[in-house]
Amino acid sequence: MTKDQINKLEMFESLRTYLDTNTNKWNGVPVLTTFKNDFDELLLDIRENQEHQEASKIFLGSNKTIQKRIVSDKADILNDALEAYAAIEENSELEQKAAKSFSDLNTLRNQDFIIVITETISLLEQHLAALKNYGVTHNQIIDLKHSFDQFLAIQGLPRQYKIAGKQATIGLAELFNQTTDLLTTKMDKIFKQFKNSDATFYNGYIAARNIINN
């Protein structure tokens, strides 16, 4: 990667982490959920595209703990809905599987964590039709998949979920162009609605969007 690409990727990753840790601020806007999923997919494709380049190593290691917490938090929220559904349906086996808190998940050994999150996603997909009445959406599951794939990438493991699949053969430069275009022509404009309603969150978004030239 070029120096400019490295600086941009650091900004992309910073923004992704900021949005993931503030999901409750923006996920009520359906179009933002769609754009965020597109953004996550592009970042995963960038990482795959340059995984053999030495520069990619600077993004790994320090974010393991943060990314595990992000996945645990998202899985915990969806597990609550799954647990409530299982209790009402008197499905004790499902209720037991869903009864995992943030702490339960985040303190698992990484190998066990991968197994449990994979099972959680599978259960959510199996019961999605019923879970819609409990506030669970398809996009929320995709969001969890993306965050989990980011965790796997940081662990140096292959991702489990290829959501879009349309970027696989696109070169690195084009991936950067598409990601920049998504931010400037779509996400930046939609996130501007928070400028007055939640200035603290919006200012954090703008700060995360800042490219630091190293």
Image (cartoon, rainbow, N blue to C red):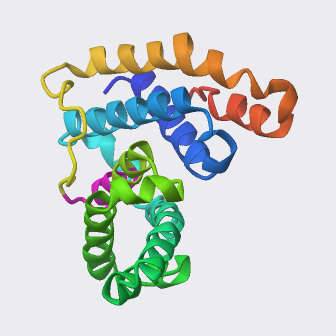
- State the predominant SS element of the stretch in magenta: helix
| Residue located 30% across and 39% down the image | 44
Q: Which residue is nearer to you in this view: 88 or 170?
A: 88
The quadrant holding residue 188 is top right
Examine the rendered structure and indicate whether residue 108 appears above or below residue 133.
below
Q: Position of residue 55 (x, y in %)?
A: 32, 39
Q: Which residue is nearer to you in this view: 68 or 164?
A: 164
Q: Position of residue 164 (x, y in %)?
A: 24, 32
Residue 150 on the magenta segment: yes
Q: Position of residue 165 (x, y in %)?
A: 18, 32
Examine the rendered structure and indicate whether residue 103 appears above or below residue 143.
below
Instruction: State the quadrant of the N terminus.
Output: top left
Q: Which residue is nearer to you in this view: 80 or 181?
A: 80
Residue 103 on the magenta segment: no
Part of the protein shown in magenta: 147-157
From this viewpoint, which residue is outermost toward the front? 89
Q: Is residue 189 left or right of residue 203?
A: left
Q: Could you tell me how many numbered marks the image carries?
A: 0
Examine the rendered structure and indicate whether residue 138 appears above or below residue 156.
above
Instruction: State the quadrant of the C terminus.
Output: top right
Q: Is residue 44 left or right of residue 89?
A: left
Q: Which residue is nearer to you in this view: 102 or 88?
A: 88
| Residue located 64% across and 27% down the image | 210
Q: Is residue 206 left or right of residue 29?
A: right
Q: Position of residue 184 (x, y in %)?
A: 55, 13
| Residue located 40% across and 54% down the image | 144
| Residue located 31% across and 88% down the image | 93
